């Protein structure tokens, strides 16, 4: 009975919250409707964002649904009957664990299999209907990627810093500038290209290429030299597969919107290329532990079943549930920010808010059990 009621009420609250967010998303697009795209395209774009919204608000929806369910049981004295029949806090917790496990599995599937592809599709769809390209707005100079090519011994033989100004997902990247080093302090060439396309067979193929080879000059010598920069113009040049074709696609969405698999892949790529990966590591562990917040929300809802029903009591309980959910969300963001600043290890920042709220739930249960 409790299982079915919690699932039904949580789903109802989830649909309500998602509908509210969808309305706000549509309002946010009102300036583009009729100019950049049509109303139908705005609805489709909003629909593609909904899986991410569902994943974000699912723990709060579960908490509000369970508070409503348990408060109804208390108001009709059904919970009193359960307690008199010998169901203590631990067994009661076990009863809530069943819907919790199902919802946690649903959250993992939603957050890793449904929401990331939909979010990426929404980004690509918006670029398609607007006729623009992804430019990496957070960087004034465009998108930067470090590419390391290694020899058979695993040592770097060529280090390239790749700059791309515009990106059309699944099609091409435009306005390339590649700085090639054979060692950290020695620039060997600069490659510019108007566009580049990726194929599984050849890797990146650059078009309308200009390669400028920089001569090697003695560091301490001031003697005049005849060495000149050699300039070579080519219609196309095969850059190869050292720079993975999926890397630019991953840069289109925020780390928080990636799946665990994508985050792990990109973290390993950054490690291999000697780049900082703290933000992605924080997002990985947050993504790993976030669905477990559903179990924490169910624990926090347990004390509400012990409260006597009074006039207006349900509204107060729902309000308290909303405030607890907002506090938990703020706590998660706070620790994620601290982790990004290297103040807290990533795994600790991801798990600590849940541990703190679990302790709060245990203290609240001890308090209401003592009073009853």
Image (cartoon, rainbow, N blue to C red):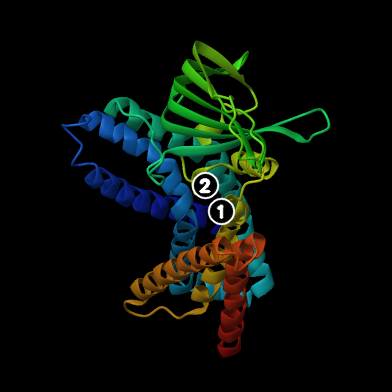
Front label number (1 vs 2): 1
Task: Characterize the local packing of mark 2: few (<14), some (14-19) or many (20 or more) Cα atoms within 10 angstroms.
Answer: many
Q: CA distance from mark 1 to mark 2?
A: 8 Å
The circle drawn on residue 255 is: 2
Residue at 25% across, 46% down: 28
Q: Position of residue 223 (x, y in %)?
A: 61, 36
Secondary structure at badge 2 equals helix
Total numbered labels: 2
Most distant residue in the left direction: 34
Residue at 59% across, 79% down: 365
Task: Determine whether, in the image, residue 106 is placed left or right of residue 142.
Answer: right
The image quadrant that residue 32 belongs to is top left
Where is the C terminus found, in terms of image quarters?
A: bottom right
Above/below status of 168 relative to 25: above
Q: Is residue 355 visible?
A: yes
Residue at 19% across, 42% down: 30
Task: Determine whether, in the image, residue 166 is placed left or right of residue 278.
Answer: left
For disc 1, the marked residue is: 279
């Amino acid at each position: 009975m409790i299982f079915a009621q919690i699932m039904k009420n949580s789903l109802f609250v989830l649909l309500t919250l998602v509908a509210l967010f969808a309305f706000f998303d549509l309002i946010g697009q009102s300036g583009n409707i009729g100019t950049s795209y049509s109303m139908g395209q705005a609805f489709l774009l909003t629909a593609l964002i909904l899986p991410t919204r569902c994943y974000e608000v699912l723990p709060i929806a579960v908490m509000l649904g369970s508070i409503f369910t348990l408060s109804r049981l208390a108001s009709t004295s059904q919970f009193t009957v359960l307690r008199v029949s010998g169901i203590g806090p631990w067994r009661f917790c076990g009863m809530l664990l069943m819907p919790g496990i199902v919802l946690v599995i649903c959250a993992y599937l939603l957050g890793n299999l449904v929401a990331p592809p939909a979010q990426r599709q929404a980004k690509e769809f918006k670029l398609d209907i607007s006729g623009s390209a992804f430019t990496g707005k957070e960087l004034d100079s465009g998108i930067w990627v470090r590419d390391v090519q290694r020899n058979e011994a695993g040592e770097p033989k060529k280090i390239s810093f790749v700059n791309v100004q515009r990106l059309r997902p699944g099609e091409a990247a435009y306005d390339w500038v590649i700085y090639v080093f054979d060692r950290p302090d020695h620039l060997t060439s600069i490659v510019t290209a108007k566009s580049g396309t990726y194929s599984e067979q050849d890797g990146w193929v650059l078009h309308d290429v200009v390669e400028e080879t920089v001569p090697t000059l003695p560091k301490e010598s001031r003697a005049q030299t005849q060495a000149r920069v050699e300039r070579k113009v080519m219609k196309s040049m095969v850059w190869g597969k050292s720079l993975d074709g999926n890397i630019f696609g991953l840069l289109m969405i925020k780390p928080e919107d990636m799946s665990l698999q994508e985050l792990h892949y990109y973290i390993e790529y950054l490690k291999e290329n000697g780049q900082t990966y703290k933000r992605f590591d924080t997002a990985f562990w947050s993504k790993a532990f976030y669905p477990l917040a559903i179990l924490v929300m169910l624990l926090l809802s347990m004390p509400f079943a012990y409260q006597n029903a009074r006039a207006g009591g349900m509204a107060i309980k729902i309000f308290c549930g909303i405030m607890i959910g907002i506090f938990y969300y703020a706590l998660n963001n706070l620790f994620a920010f601290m982790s990004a600043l290297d103040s807290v290890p990533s795994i600790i920042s991801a798990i600590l808010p849940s541990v703190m709220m679990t302790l709060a739930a245990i203290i609240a249960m001890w308090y209401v059990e003592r009073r009853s």
